[in-house]
Amino acid sequence: MKRALIAIPAAFLMALAACSDDDSPSGEEPEGSAANSSTEASAPPEPVELDLADAAGACPLIDSATLNSVTGEDFRFASGGPGEAAEGEEAPAQLTCAVQTGEAAYPDLTLFVIGTEAKVEVYEEELADGTEAIDGLGEAAYWIVHTEDTGAGPALEMGWYEGGTIFEMRYTTPVDTDPAVVNELVGGFTELAKGIAAAQAEAG
């Protein structure tokens, strides 16, 4: 069954995370507020050499050996932490992680993990034609390969919903990578995603 994508991550995830059962968004922080000033002033976390378990945010959920095996790359640096403050004082927590080889900007892997009050039906409604469903991953899951010109190569995006948590993973390849090669990575990244989901469940 084909479903579509939302063009992505942080903005969509933050909006959906703020949804209640009746799809009512939470209030916005005004520009120049103390919350926004604090976010802008905070320094980004320093990248750390893998072991991913030593990095912050969503990084400990990723199994580095599996990532390297699936991609054939040697990912060595990771940086993670809480995401930007979501709208509303009671917005669910967010975790992020970015992983790179250290040799160039791409390939890289990014992971977003965001709590949400929205039900799985709301999550599924945001998916239209263009994505492919994944069985056996969360309550609802999809994947899609982006081939638009972004200054990098094709990107595999994979997302899923499980028990009030939204996960989104994106693997971006170097320029001139064949999209067919990226399509062949779906099975391996599905296993990586299942490991992430299991690690999140174990972490509670």
Image (tube, grey):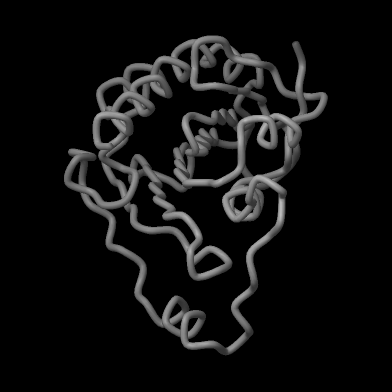
How many discs appear?
A: 0
Q: Find the residue positioned furthest to the right.
A: 129
Report the residue at 40% width, 19% height from top.
194
Residue 95 at what x, y percent from top left? Answer: 39, 50
Say above or below: 108 vs 163.
Answer: below
Apparent side of residue 24 relative to residue 32 in the rendered image (left or right): right
Could you tell me which quadrant the C terminus lies in?
top left
Say above or below: 71 vs 45.
Answer: above
Q: Name which quarter of the figure residue 11 lies in.
A: bottom right
Could you tell me which quadrant the N terminus lies in?
top right
Residue 152 at what x, y percent from top left? Answer: 61, 42
**Residue 147 vs residue 3, the one in the foreground:** 3
**Residue 139 vs residue 20, the one in the foreground:** 20
Apparent side of residue 172 relative to residue 130 in the rendered image (left or right): left
Report the residue at 64% width, 21% height from top.
178
Q: Find the residue positioned furthest to the front.
A: 22
**Residue 153 vs residue 113, the one in the foreground:** 113
Say above or below: 126 vs 115.
Answer: above
